[in-house]
Structure formats: C-alpha cells, structure tokens
Amino acid sequence: MKKYLMLLFAVLSFSLTGCEETDVEAGGTAVEKMAGTWYVTWEQKNAQGEWEDVLGGTVELNTYNTAANVPTEMWLKEGYLLNTALKVTTNYAGRTFEMAETSIAVNEANWGTPKITLSITDGKVLEGEATTPSGMPADSIVFFVNVQGDDTYKIAGFRRTGFAEDE
C-alpha cells in the first residue's frame, strides 16, 4: 500500500509542476513577411536587350532575420553563384531591400576570382504576386545585382510552397 501511495504522490507532484503558465507568447521575427526560402532565376540582358536565364533553371535563395531582429535589416543567402550571406537594408513597411556596393568573397569556380564587388538594388517582396509551376499563387521576390560595376543580373522568383509540384 505504501508503494502505491508513493507512486501516486510522485505522479501528482509531476503533473502539478510540469505545466507552468508563462506570459511569453510565441511570435514571428521583425522581417517575417520578407523571410523565407525562394526559388529564383538569374537573368541577364542578351544582345537584343531581353532578359535571359543564365543558369538554365532555378536556385534556392534564403532570406531571414539578423541576430538583432530589427525591421531594418535581414540576411539574403544564395548558395550557388554567390555562395555567401549578404546583409541587406530593409524597409519592412514597403517590403523593399537594397545593399550598398560591397566587396565580398564568392564561389571562385563561378566568377573566376575569389572576391567581387557588388550592390543590390530595387529589391522587393510582393505578397501573392507570383504563380508557381503548379499554378498556385505565392509571394514573389525580385532584385538586381550589379557586379563589378558593369554586369547587372535580375534575380526573381517565388516563395517555396512545400508542394512537390513546385519544387
């Protein structure tokens, strides 16, 4: 009988102390509507002045909050051509971003040099403005990368939906 009373007491003590209420509510980050995983294409103007895909398909791009978690900056990471994370300045209310000219280390196999100078202009996240390969609406991202002051690339795509048809 003592053994059962001890077991009952142990179970009750754990059940009474295991669930404390807190005043902390889970929430998003300061740039949550601009953050995410995106499938983007890199395009450059051809001789006729039309934008043309330079990679032959999409690559993954990630945007996420900085450690400061403020609405004025976020990380932009593209792991294929740039192979680095870039801190961009954001206007969260307008869903825009940019980065002043910066010298960065890059994937030397893609650029032929270990460092390049680039800037990001006219960055925008447009809610619900993209159509995915499956035909569903999604958020859109678009921005321009100017490399070494003369080559400009348009990077544009849609937010990852998680549907197999869009991967």
Image (spheres, rainbow, N blue to C red):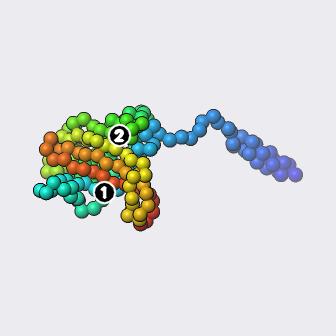
Q: Amino acid at mark 1?
A: Val
Q: Quadrant of residue 103?
A: top left
Residue 125 vs 41, above or below: the answer is above
Q: Position of residue 146 (x, y in %)?
A: 20, 44
Residue situated in front as seen by the camera: 122 or 55: 122
Residues at circles 1 and 2 in contact by the CB criterion of under 8 Å: no
Q: Position of residue 26 (x, y in %)?
A: 56, 41
- Which residue has dot 2 on it? 96
- Which residue has dot 1 on it? 59
| Left or right position of 23 against 112 | right
Q: Nearer the viewer, mark 1 or mark 2?
A: 2
Residue located 15% across and 47% down the image: 151
Q: Quadrant of residue 138?
A: bottom left
Q: Where does the C terminus fall, quadrant-wise?
A: bottom left
| Left or right position of 65 against 56 | right
Residue sticking out furthest to the left: 47
Residue located 39% across and 52% down the image: 129
Query: Is residue 150 at all visible to an observer of this figure?
Result: yes
Residue sticking out furthest to the right: 1
Q: Position of residue 108 (x, y in %)?
A: 18, 50
Q: What secondary structure is marked by label 2? A: strand
Mark 1 or mark 2, which has the lower sequence index? 1
Residue located 20% across and 41% down the image: 118
User: Circle 1: is it few (<14), some (14-19), or many (20+) Cα within 10 Å?
Assistant: some
Give the CA distance from mark 1 to mark 2.
Answer: 21 Å
Query: Is residue 60 at all visible to an observer of this figure?
Result: no
Residue 102 vs 113, above or below: the answer is above
Q: What secondary structure is marked by label 1? A: strand
Q: Quadrant of residue 130?
A: bottom left
Q: Amino acid at mark 2?
A: Thr
Residue 32 shows which numbered tag? none
